[in-house]
Image (cartoon, grey):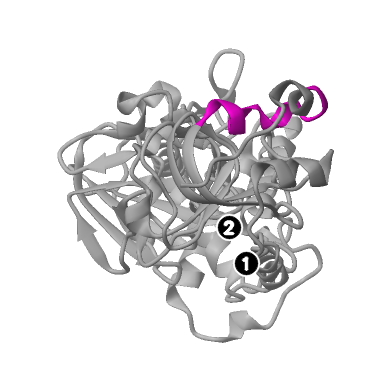
Amino acid sequence: MLVYSSNKDRVLKNRPNLDWLFDGEYRAELLDLSPASPKGFNPSGGIKGSLIIFKGIWRNGSFKGVMMGGNSSISGGRIIDGIFISQPDSFQISPWNFWSGGFSPMKGFVMGMPTAKDNTKYKKISLAQVPSEKIIKIIDNNDQEHILTVEKGINITSLDFIINGQKVDWINYTKDKASFEKSFMVVGKNFMIPDIGFEIDKGIQSIEIKTLDYSPKNISVEKESPEKAPTEDVNKFKIKTKEKGWTPGGKGYYNLDIDTNDNDLIESISKFKNDINSGKFFNYLNFFKRIIKEGRVDGYGKFPSLAFIFPNTIGVNYKNDDKKRDAVMKYFSDFRENVIDNFSSQNISEYYINLVKKYIDQKSTPPKNKTKKKTAVKSSRPKINEEKLSFYKIISKIL
């Protein structure tokens, strides 16, 4: 066993961030400094942007370094602003005791749980088990399909998720076991992610993990008969959704300037209201986002009403046969013509044009230099200096 010693008061006076090394219970084989922390990672237990590399066994206390090496493990305590890059069975604490930091999924496991596999159905699965760039397809007990696009899952840079284009903080699931259980989707139960306004309140019928090329099957159901709106509400855009900014303010509705005897128009508007209320509308928006990202849409093509999304760009891909693409573009073209263009107030029309455009711009544009970013993350992982240092020597190096 290696025993490390140093003048605690002297060290903490100059480097208070190292208190966890004095307060923790552990057996260390190596302590070293990483060249630098991963980009965007701000360690609370490091020194001037560098993390403490740890090889050994951590038994208790708050770990705030980089745990790496085949024989390294954590069997007690918690991880705060730390990074775990050891073997799957070396992670022996509860997931909710990993408060913040990064985790490198290895050999198909994350925090002691197997990572989800493509095209596989599950009766119970946590968001933590779903890797980046996957789709969670959920069917509720009303046979309604719900889509969660996991653009970023748990990785070495952070434990936070990006789902349907919005950030979901990992800290929501780390208060205790009960809070972590909320990360699970379970067949037969309801599920919600408050951060993004996602909720299934009819019970889950099935859960399946898909790749990003999956297309929502009910994108083509636009011909289904919508529920008839009450007669007195046909000229009112009255909706309610958790999507920020979409629910009308004031009296809870916006007036529409329409011919109340035009049954086809009233039926179309009623369908859009139902789709927004049920969340189907936003599933279609996410599908639209995906096919733009894939390059299947490069302009407004056959639907000039969508020129506000693609200014002065007709594109060329519209000449290719793509039924699902045409279906979703017609859907939003109808929304522009039948709803947005019929608001009594021009300001409200402009508001919803900007709302749709903002949604598309924020959620469909692929990240710049995505490949380079991944490479940067990989190359910025801490490297081990195989020279073994005593606690006294490492402290001496940095004081």
When asked about the image quadrant of residue 179, the answer is top left
Callout 1, which amino acid?
Phe
Q: Does residue 78 appear anywhere in the picture?
A: yes
**Residue 318 screen position, x and y as percent:** 60, 79
Rendered-image quadrant of the C terminus: top right
Q: Which residues are magenta?
A: 13-24
Q: Are marks 2 and 1 in contact (CB under 8 Å)?
A: yes
The residue at which mark 1 appears reads as 303
Callout 2, which amino acid?
Ser
Residue lying at 54% horizontally and 43% vertically, measured from the top left: 160
Question: Height in image: 379 above or below 394?
Answer: below
Q: Nearer the viewer, residue 350 or 193?
A: 193
Residue lying at 69% horizontally and 49% vertically, measured from the top left: 357
Q: Which label's residue is closer to the chain start, 2 or 1?
A: 1
Instruction: Judge whether residue 110 is colored magenta.
Output: no
Count the marks. 2
Q: Main secondary structure of the magenta part?
A: helix
Q: Nearer the viewer, residue 174 or 366?
A: 174
Question: Height in image: 303 above or below 76?
Answer: below
When asked about the image quadrant of residue 114, the answer is bottom left
The residue at which mark 2 appears reads as 333
**Residue 78 screen position, x and y as percent:** 46, 33
**What distance separates the C-alpha of mark 2 from that of mark 1?**
6 Å
**Residue 276 screen position, x and y as percent:** 45, 39
Q: Please rate how many residues cluster around mark 1, counting C-alpha atoms within 10 Å: few if below 14, some from 14 to 19, many from 20.
A: some
Residue lying at 75% horizontally and 48% vertically, measured from the top left: 50
